[in-house]
Image: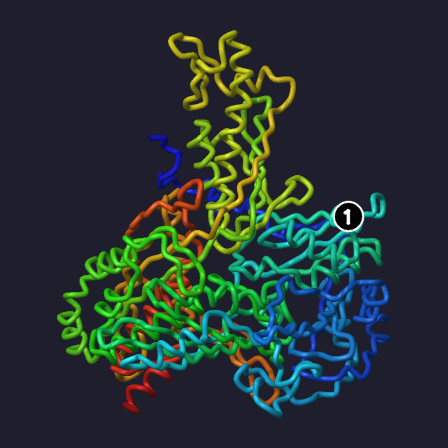
Amino acid sequence: MNKFGIGQPVLRDEDIRFISGKGLYTGDISLTNQTYMYVLRSNVSNGLIKSLDIDDALKSSGVINIFLGKDLREAGIKDMPTNFKAKNKDGSDMYTPERPAIAIDKVRHVGDPIAIIIAESIEQAKNASELIFADIEEIASVTSCNEAIKDNSPQVWEDTKNNLCFDWEMGEQDKVEDAFKIADSIVEIELINNRIVPNSMETRGAVANFNKEDGRYELSCSSQGVHSLRDRISNVLNIEPSEIRVITTDVGGGFGMKIFNYPEYICSLFASKIIGRPVKWVSDRSEAFLSDTHGRDHVTKAKLALDKEGIFLGIKIDTVANMGAYLSNFAIFIPTLAGTAMLAGCYKTPAIYVNVKGVFTNTPAIDAYRGAGRPEASFVIERLVDVAGIKSGLGPIEIRRRNLIPSSEMPYKTALNHTYDTGDFIGNMELAVKDSDWQGFKDRAKISKENNKIRGIGLSTYIEACSGGGPEEATIILEKNGSITLHIGTQSNGQGHETAYKQILCEYLGIGPEKMTVIQGDSDVIAFGAGTGGSRSVPVGGAAIKVASENIINKTKSLAAQKLNIDESTLEYKEGIFLAEGTNLTISLEDLAKDSNEPIKISSQWTPPNYTFPNGCHICELEVDKDTGQIEIKKYTVVDDFGLVINPNMLAGQVHGGIAQGIGQAIYENTVYDSENGQLLSGSFMDYALPRAEDLINVDIRWNMVPCETNLLQIKGAGEAGAIGAPPAVINALVNALNIEHIDMPATPNKVWSKLHSN
């Protein structure tokens, strides 16, 4: 077996660069004659802009220019569009508002850009911003999606009633109603999926430059894919995609948030062209809370119909999804097709109907956050199933045994039209139950009770649709010195793509990683790429690498035959060497490259025929302090089916990170706004709680690998799984400990203490 090939737990190649301080992030980039941009943002959540007086600010030391929204509009800069639209259930079009990069007549959330200041230093730009007099007539605002949809609520956009963006449906309503009519029991639950700020370690940033010589723009920024960003930016700037180059170097976390176009990118590029100098902007943490896209923020009512044996007959779900004030690139897709289609979960439910209403609020835009609709769906279905287990008396394990899709019925088409190719859902749960020592829980609970603690245990199953986003292209260049250069259009945000891709190359080409270079994040150098998101990079990008590897072997085989003066059909390729059958004649790929007049280059695309469906089971065991309401995770067990595993170490890291974020949402993180004036009350790490290292424990992980039948490498994807399975597992364990039906996320000590003392 290849020591650096597929399946090997090798250490990450890129880590040496990072831990030795040689990483290159957007904030590290500076250009000659560079200027700095500061974004003046609205301090009111809903208001009419009466005037903006910039005269004194323009005279401030170091100020080069100040731009307002009208300046961009007069220059032909277009509004920033959303990339996905949905039809209302009556067939009418959804409401699509404008989104200028800088607000012109009205501000719609705290943090809405109202001016940009370009100066010789960031300090001078900030100082000048304090001299701008903004006359904004504050009007009533609304931040809660449940309130926004009510009659007579403050309007974010005047042209749509009750702040409604869309009213969308999926499934067969008549079939569901029939199922509920014959049900022996109906279980109902209402829950909140709390609003999350992504908080990547590296904040967003941009270094923009317009080159007068060739008339092209160049943008260096922290992103999840340069090609899609190039296309979106060029559309807003009203130029051809070929007129802009987008570069992304190292990225310190993305979690979905960095794949989108943002006003600051448009503004910095526009300003650079006008002033004739490079412009740099890097968000600080407070600014990130106000300007990054947020995640989640749903309110859901769900009903489950069961027969007398506890078999699921039908599910009905009504969700109100917060869109924020503006529509980000995939804002509509996340609560509709991305999330809703996964509400079948791992279960055999013959009839499902879902209604989703998207509403505007006076808050930053909502879009994809790790899992992108799938965590929201999983939380609904797994909480609903758990409550059904309690009310039916079957318990959480037995009710799932009776309703999980057996592997013998694969491929399985759900009531929401996904077809699962493979999966061992019952096996995942049984393995997790065994590994967690569920049977010994009662003994551990007795010990907890002796220490004035309450112990709880809960499980969740999960499944997600991954590897979408269309084709991916890999270009392999066999350089004249025998080394390999890979061009790939995905974008690592810290996952370890460089190592994983080298492992795939090593597996199929038999060349050591020390002779490989992975190039990503440059729209001029790399012809095509769909970027990173939806756990697609290694399943789709890796498959493209396999195709390119096979094609470069086929291309060089004819060259090898010519060099050895033998028939091509007698050649076998193994570990970087062509061998002639029945002879001792050989020639290496490296020698072929050195003898070639120019580098040997192959570009190959691979298009996934369907989504992949990673799945698994999480079991959480926790303790609650009766006096304080404090929660401590005591034991966490996971069984995951990701198909073929490229690197077990890196895969475990992905699962750990996802679980940390899932635990964060379940018991720590929450974005809070003042309901009266729309001010963000949790805009710093003093107010917004993230899980710390001391809050997390070792996770017992087992792989139950069922090869994927719709992926060339048999991979299903893994990047988001932990964040999907963890929240319901934690909350299910908590309600088990508290002996209650439900508690909303985040389950803070105050909430838990209140439940304890009201029960």
- Quick one: 465 or 489, which is closer to the camera? 465
Question: Can residue 303 be seen here?
Answer: yes
The percent coordinates of residue 341 (x first, y second) are: 46, 64
Residue at 32% of width from left, 68% of height from top?
Answer: 729
Specify the amino acid type for callout 1.
Glu
Residue 259: quarter of image: bottom right
Please state if 261 lies on the left or on the right of 427 as rendered: right
- Quick one: 359 or 516, which is closer to the camera? 359
Residue at 49% of width from left, 42% of height from top?
Answer: 14
The percent coordinates of residue 227 (x first, y second) are: 65, 49
- Marker count (numbered): 1
Q: Label 1, on which residue? A: 243
Viewport quadrant of the N terminus: top left
For mark 1, does the 10 Å Cα neighbourhood hold few (<14), some (14 to 19), or many (20 or more) residues? some
Residue at 75% of width from left, 62% of height from top?
Answer: 267
Q: How is the image coloured?
A: rainbow
Residue 352: quarter of image: bottom left
Viewport quadrant of the C terminus: bottom left
Q: Looking at the image, is 157 positioned above or below residue 662?
A: below
Please state if 200 lies on the left or on the right of 622 as rendered: right
Residue at 48% of width from left, 61% of height from top?
Answer: 370
Question: Can residue 686 be seen here?
Answer: no
The percent coordinates of residue 39 (x first, y second) are: 71, 68
The percent coordinates of residue 108 (x first, y second) are: 68, 79
- Quick one: 109 or 405, which is closer to the camera? 405
Judged from the image, the secondary structure of the residue bearing numbered disc 1 is helix
